Image: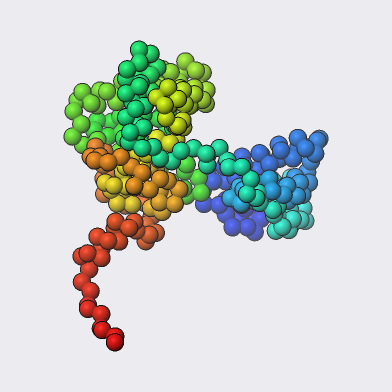
């Protein structure tokens, strides 16, 4: 429906129906913000006019998203007969002059999260939790261990399922081609029956706590507070739940190639992990591979040709080179 609407409006269609739905949802955020500041029920052209004057309010990536979202909303309204062709043209023309992006202001919340933790800090945190008599601390120690091992996004634990020697996770970021597919399957080779039952017990404990908090958002806020308090008690700088994903991925970079790390992380291409996540040097030392991915699944990840330093050195070592001529 969305692709058809945009096509009839003479614009390039989005990749999938899901992407179109996500764009319209994003556009609704802009509409609500404009309504709060303008009052009443502004037209789409008035909303776009407000957006293009919202200087230094949004990051460049957010501006690009909102521009695409407003274009999609305009195309859909035109297809539904709720927007005239001339009005759509005016909307698109107005969007050609986007607002000025946010300057060097305070860091966003995500940028303040720690991307690395020293091994000594992790040991101190785990020991502090294990020596505690609180049931929540025992669960938190399990959460840290499981998340560092599998490094999912926090929300991806909500629908995690074990299937034999595999753990199936639903990829959280699937719009705009950001994931290699709707799910990813993490192999658990060599794990004993007792270890697999431990994973089941962890998933049950996690969902029990999430249900007790009413919804996942409330559970995540509770988890973040518990982790912060545990770090303070252990005498280390506070961590966020997402910091554990950084640590697990950094450790995985010591064991797997970039394409495999990307699959295990739920990324569409092999560049995201190197651009946005902690480097391998921030990972744990002496880690052993307890998870894996099947080659046919790893093949779903798009290769950008950008290799790590370790991969470059390995390739160079096995590539014969002719001696360079001496120049006097």
* Quadrant housing the C terminus: bottom left
Image location of residue 95, percent across then percent down = 70, 55
Please name the colour scheme applied to the rendered image.
rainbow
Q: Is residue 289 left or right of residue 263?
A: left
Residue 88 is at least partly visible in this image: no
Q: Nearer the viewer, residue 267 or 116?
A: 116
Residue at x 20%, y 65% (from the top left corner): 318
Image location of residue 193, percent across then percent down = 19, 25
Residue at x 35%, y 12% (from the top left corner): 133
Q: Is residue 196 above or below residue 111?
A: above
Image location of residue 150, percent across then percent down = 33, 36
Q: Nearer the viewer, residue 237 or 157?
A: 237
Residue at x 32%, y 58% (from the top left corner): 309
Q: Is residue 205 left or right of residue 210?
A: left
Q: How many marks?
A: 0
Q: Is residue 255 above or below residue 140?
A: below
Q: Nearer the viewer, residue 97 or 240?
A: 240
Image location of residue 94, percent across then percent down = 74, 55
Place residue 325 in its image quadrant.
Answer: bottom left
Place residue 158 in its image quadrant.
Answer: top left
Residue 272 is at least partly visible in this image: yes
Q: Nearer the viewer, residue 280 or 319?
A: 280
Residue at x 80%, y 35% (from the top left corner): 39
């Amino acid at each position: 429906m969305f692709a058809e609407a945009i096509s009839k409006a003479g614009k390039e269609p989005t990749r999938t129906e899901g992407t179109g739905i996500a764009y319209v949802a994003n556009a609704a955020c802009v509409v609500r913000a404009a309504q709060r500041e303008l009052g009443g029920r502004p037209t789409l052209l008035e909303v776009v006019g407000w957006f293009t004057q919202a200087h230094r309010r949004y990051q460049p990536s957010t501006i690009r998203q909102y521009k695409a979202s407003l274009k999609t909303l305009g195309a859909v309204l035109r297809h539904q007969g709720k927007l005239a062709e001339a009005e759509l043209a005016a909307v698109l023309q107005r969007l050609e002059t986007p607002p000025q992006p946010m300057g060097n202001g305070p860091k966003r919340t995500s940028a303040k999260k720690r991307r690395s933790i020293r091994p000594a800090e992790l040991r101190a945190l785990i020991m502090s939790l294990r020596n505690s008599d609180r049931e929540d601390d025992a669960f938190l120690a399990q959460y840290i261990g499981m998340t560092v091992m599998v490094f999912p996004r926090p929300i991806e634990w909500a629908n995690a399922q074990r299937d034999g020697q595999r753990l199936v996770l639903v990829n959280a970021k699937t719009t705009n081609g950001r994931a290699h597919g709707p799910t990813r399957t993490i192999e658990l080779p060599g794990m004993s029956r007792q270890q697999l039952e431990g994973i089941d017990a962890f998933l049950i404990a996690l969902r029990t706590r999430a249900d007790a908090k009413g919804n996942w958002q409330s559970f995540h806020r509770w988890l973040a507070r518990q982790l912060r308090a545990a770090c303070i008690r252990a005498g280390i700088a506070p961590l966020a739940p997402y910091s554990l994903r950084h640590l697990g991925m950094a450790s995985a970079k010591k064991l797997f190639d970039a394409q495999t790390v990307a699959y295990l992380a739920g990324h569409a291409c092999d560049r995201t992990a190197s651009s946005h996540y902690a480097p391998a040097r921030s990972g744990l030392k002496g880690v052993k591979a307890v998870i894996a991915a099947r080659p046919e699944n790893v093949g779903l990840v798009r290769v950008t040709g950008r290799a790590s330093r370790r991969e470059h050195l390995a390739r160079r070592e096995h590539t014969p080179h002719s001696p360079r001529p001496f120049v006097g």
